[in-house]
Amino acid sequence: MATPKARAGRAAALHRRAEAAATAAAGILDEIRPAPADHHRQYELAERLRAAAELAASGWAGGPLETLTAATPPGDGPPPLVRVGSAAPLDDARFPALAPLFGSGHVSLDADASDPRVAGLLRALLLRVFAATPTGALLARAVDGGSGAAFAGYATLADAGLLPPPATDLAGMRAVLAEAEQWVAAGTARQRAHDRTLLLVVAALPEGTTTADLDRLAGLAEGGPRAGLHLVVAGWPDGGALPRATAITVRTAYALVGDPPGAGFSSPGAEPPGGLNSPVFLDEDPPAELVAAVCARLVRQIEDGSRLSLGDLLPADGFWTGGSADGLSTTVGDAAGRPVSLGFAELTPHWLVSGRGQAGRSAFLTDALFGLAARYGPDELALYLADLADGESFVEFLQTERDRSWVPQVRAAGMAADREYVADLFGELEAELRRREEASRRAGGQRYAELRQHQPLPRIVCVIDNFPLVLRERDRLATDLLTRLDALARAGRSYGIHLVLAGEGDLGIGGPRDPLLGQFPVRVALPGGSAVLEPANDSAAGLPVGSAVVNTAGGLGGPRGATRGHERMIRFPDPYEDPDVLAGLRRRLWEARGESAAPPVVFAGYARPLLANDPRHRAALAGRAHAPAALLGRAVDVRRSTVAVPLGPGAGRNLAVLGRDEEAERLLVTAVRSAAVAHPGAARFVLAPLANGSAEPAGVLAAELAGRHRVETVDAAGLRTAMASDEPGYLVVFGLDVPDAEELPPELLRSLLLEGPPAGRHLLGWWRTPAPLAGLLGPEGEVDKLTAVAVTDVPGGRLEQLFDRPVWWRPRPGRAMLWDGPDEQGTIFVPFGAGEGSA
Ligand SMILES: Nc1ncnc2c1ncn2[C@@H]1O[C@H](COP(=O)(O)OP(=O)(O)OP(=O)(O)O)[C@@H](O)[C@H]1O
């Protein structure tokens, strides 16, 4: 779309052109005065006028309707001269009768649209001016106090905002007059010239029109042209002329066209009535198909032209020029053609974004985040992204198999994230908050903006989508997270730590009086997202996809229809419309990154980590293991920490895997495999596959370890012997609660667990039920003195006998929990997968 400045420039050029055309026309007309007597000269003049008219108003502005099709291109602005009919000085000598309109004046008719010829002309005029003008540069308002149906063929323009349904009564007309007066007032004010033109068409004055109403019309006619307002008024009463208008008088057989304003057809000093000295046959109704085709083109072009793209949200002055010391701000969309900004600062620290599924929530967030990432470099902005819903999220910010670029402000992303991921994310933010508070204390209580003068402290924006899933179960974890959220929101705002919670409904963070809600003054309601606004605020009712209500006063409403400074209805682009554009933007941001930039740490809740890809395991394979340890998986956390059980000389450095499923067995195998790699030099491994079906995995393991270690595979009796021996090594037992194993003396097992590790002997065992393991506890309990415990499918309630305290663990597929150490709350992790094709 052209900029307002360009449009204003074009309007001025058109104005100058209209003036020139009127002057030229006056010159030509001068030559035909006085009316020549001989026909020959009249033919010649008519021909010259026809040629002149063709030059002055070609195509839609002046061409005969039958020569025009929907494919006839528009001109470059509203036409300065428009054809109203055909002048016929002689029966067979004709030339187009033109009236100056845009840039200079108006047209008035003494009859209204109840005369079909007038109705036909009005429809032809409307078609001409809309079709001649680039779509969107001309708007029209209509008054039809007669049948109300004069412009029925143009109804489709209403939705496109070009021509609302006509006002049919006095109140309606007065509203239109008021709007036009406002237009003139705004357009006349300095530096606020409109970039569009408004045409007011009156087909018939409504009943009860007063002289005051006519005066208002006359006032508009007087002041309108300077502000880009023009009038076509049918049914203008006899008596006073409409200022600056070319008056058309309708007679029985033809019409007369009066002098155009400021440039008479008659020579100076001629007697009234003046005007064009020729009968004029008004243009007739345009064909309905032509009207329909032109309207369809206009509507289509308005829709295309009004579609925003991601590029509209990006800064005009290049990337990363913004400083975030005082806040962050980005364009999130457009309200009535003007960009709308939204951001994060101390007074508007946190956002709530709500919308039903498929309402464009991801689209809105993607727009906003790319807008921020384009404005603020990684020293100014750091992003943490989390989504609790299943499936891939934020992929446009992250590396993919084919495209290794990423958005450099993104530190970490969690998709299909567990609640524990959010807990850890809060932990990261809390730690950062403490660091910043401490820095502030050390600097004598400096505020964030001051601290930033001597140390890099990017603002942090943490987005959690589908937040209601955090609170789906109102359990201890949920309560704990809500408390921590409250504290973070309260303290974070002053230290550049900002939260965006998104999801459906009210996001579950309390009723309207909940003080926590007060921490989130910015509310974005997408379709179906009214719940984040105040209950009485219905401004988001019936929003279409691609629009949102953006409110910076905690969702507070206001009187209906009133302009609310704190609330805007915006449209935002669909960032997924063109994936190449999005990918291109990511690459540009990525190319601008610093040398030390590291890709975001990505947690994908549905994926399985592989031991082969684990950094700690790889270090061990490369001979850089720092200590022997059994590796189990990757924690559900922001850093994707490797979950390891160190197998050093301390008491209790053993591993008990507890669970009935294959996952438990696989955990044991992975633990042994990784411990074997991490062990310095060769070690002794005694494998005891006591449980049914464990001979095979034990066999595979034995084969794998045999290259480097000494491996023995034993039965229950062999195991007993190995347990009793002092020889250092790893005893690996599949099924410590099978009947065979139950014959092992508990004291032997207990003393191995307690005293083995200091002597280099570690037990890595698999129990399917907790009772036998619990049976090994001494009177004082304390399982951690015996072993670390990794649990798969045994629920927390059944673990209390083992841990002697309440245990919060609800088994779920693909997750396990490790307790290692006396005060351990337990670490949730994703066990390493067995096969290829996992992350
Ligand atoms: N501004 C827009 N204009 C038109 N279509 C849009 C716009 N924004 C998003 N869409 C389209 O709407 C659909 C839903 O968008 P999006 O994925 O952002 O929704 P969502 O609310 O995140 O959905 P869910 O959370 O259910 O996955 C997509 O097909 C998207 O292309």
Image (cartoon, helix red, strand yellow):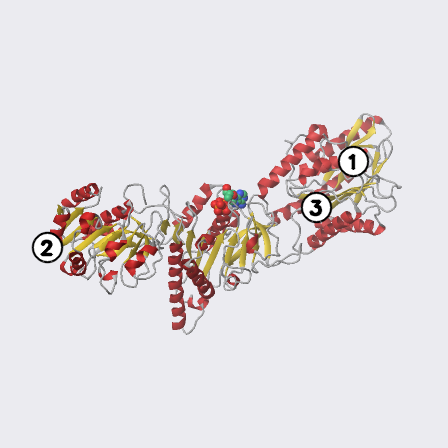
Question: Which element carries disc 3, helix, strand or loop?
Answer: strand
Q: Amino acid at mark 2?
A: Ser
Choose mark 3 or mark 1, whichever is in front.
Answer: 1
**Image vertical order of residue 244 relative to residue 35, above or below:** below
Residue type at numbered disc 1: Ala
Q: Secondary structure at mark 1?
A: helix
- Count of numbered marks: 3
* Amino acid type for the residue under numbered disc 3: Leu
Give above or below for 784 relative to 291: below
User: Can you give x and y, in whole percent of width and height, for residue 666 in the image?
Assistant: 26, 46
Residue 725 is tagged as 2
Q: Position of residue 773 (x, y in %)?
A: 24, 55
Q: In the rendered image, which residue does mark 3 sit on?
A: 198
Give how far across and how far down residue 242 sits, in percent: 82, 46
- Counting from the top left corner in percent of width and height, residue 647 is at 20, 57
| Residue at horizontal 62 percent and vertical 57 percent from the top | 536
Q: Is residue 519 visible?
A: yes
**Residue 709 in view in this figure:** no
Q: Nearer the viewer, residue 309 or 6?
A: 309
Mark 3 residue's CB less than 8 Å from ligand 1: no
Q: Respond yes or no on whether mark 1 lies under 8 Å from ligand 1.
A: no
